[in-house]
Image: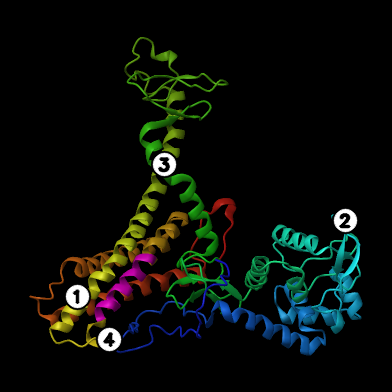
Amino acid sequence: MNYNDDAGFSGDEFDEDCYASDDDDGIGIRNSNNATPEPPLNDCQVLAQDSLNDEMNKISAETSAVLGFPPQVCKILLHKYHWNKEILLEKFYEAEDSQKFFDKQKIQISTKVTDIGQPLNYKSGLCQICFEIKSLTGLSCGHRYSPDCWDSYLMATIQERADPYVPCPDPECKLIADDECAMKLLLTDEHKRQYKRMVVNSFVDSNELLKWCPAAHCNKVIKVNHPEARAVTCDCGFTFCFLCSQEWHEPVNCTMLKFWLKKCSDDSETSNWLNANTKDCPQCHVTIEKDGGCNHMTCRSVTCKFEFCWMCLGPWKPHGSGWYSCNRYEDKEAKEARSAQEVSRAALQRYLHYYNRFVNHQNSLKFENKLQDQIKIKMQQMQAHGFTWVETQFLANAVAVLNKCRRTLMYTYAFAYYLKSNNASNVFEDNQRDLETATEQLSEKLERELDIDTDDLVKIKQEVQDRYRYVDQRREVLLKHCFEGLERGDWVFNLPQQQQQK
């Protein structure tokens, strides 16, 4: 997600206590006393695009007040230190003087106020880029170039480096053009707009306390107090992981999620078809498709050409004239081939078991997003029967809990796929089953069993509240067990290259 200079919205400080109310008729959802609530959403602030420049200028001004350099110079230094003011100040005061500090950064910045934000006056001469006699300008270093060459150089270098702070074109010069000076060297309004976007985007992308909201069509930025923040929620309602910018994915960590999503992307599209229609050559392990009824197979690999039986995977030669049947079932080579094949197929079957359930809950989430529209209609029907708007909010709460539980269930299957079996994993699977059962019961109640026109509405309300409270409690129990298992070291994961992260 990037800065869009056409957007015209403002952001307010996010109030993350979305589920704090104990009023079941309001928007709150009460936590069970018998379960540990999910980790609280980290304290965060939602910034609108038009406030990002203010945020940038505020940090620059604070740094300028300490270092005594112009704010434009501080912007360049802050950018180099990922907008971490504390680290910049620490490194600056570790140096003996400011010149040694700049030398260590391998950059040159003019700190004179008269040199900041203003190119040199125009002077006729030979441009060292286009080699034409033109009116030339440049930075305080004295290297002058034509306006057209400056414009082309700045745009090309900015796009190539993905960095708005670029040095003088002279290959021996390290003087950095500050943003105000660069804006005056650019010729067209479009180039100036692109440069402004680059400055803002680099501010967000390099700042460890800021992240673009990854939700579609949302251009807001989340600001946190600590970079280790986990779950954050944008004003648009999307909750995501601040570390990896994926939707909030408890109980799996970011490393596990990365492996899982890559495996799903690489394997799942063809796994079902391969499982049903192919086998691996017992000798070279190339995947082979059976396209006829004959069980006499010949590997098509030019370096193999191994002939084997499709049924038992043993060498074909001992089968003699019984080509249509497997009359060497106990052959040692065939048994070894079948064993290796069975291990491979079993691994695939295990993966598909978890993947199919992951996708099932993912698809259910999409369908249940449509359920929100149906629930709004039912809420309107209840209001027509004398209920107030507040009194109908239990239905909206139920859908919110249902979506939350679906998402948790979805990621429990990624968690379970990498989890080694032990006593603790058996408890996890029991909790997973209980949550899944309760979730399906709540889903069925909301989708099929609500008849606003004929049922007792007071009874409906009580039943729905009981169900969503119970399913939310089961979710909390499952997550509590997962978090406590991590703390106790109960979980052992089979991650690629054993890259485990807690």
Residue 67 x %, y %:
81, 86
Indicate the amino acid at tag 2.
Glu
Residue 282 is marked as: none
Element carrying mark 1:
helix
Identify the disc placed on residue 132.
2
Label 1: which residue? 378
- For residue 294, above or below residue 415: above
The residue positioned 32% from the left and 16% from the top of the image is 324
Are the two marked residues, 3 and 4, in contact with CB atoms closer than 8 angstroms? Answer: no
Task: Please report whichever mark, 2 or 1, sits nearer to the chain's N-terminal start.
Answer: 2
Local SS, label 4: loop
Mark 4 Cα-neighbour bin, 10 Å: few <14, some 14–19, many ≥20: some
For the point 72% across and 65% down, the residue is 163
User: Marks 4 and 2: CB-CB under 8 Å?
Assistant: no
Distance between the alpha carbons at the discs numbered 3 and 4: 46 Å
Q: Nearer the viewer, mark 4 or mark 1?
A: 1
Q: Give the mark, 3 or 4, whose residue is nearer the N terminus.
A: 4
* Label whose residue precedes the other's in the sequence (3 or 2): 2
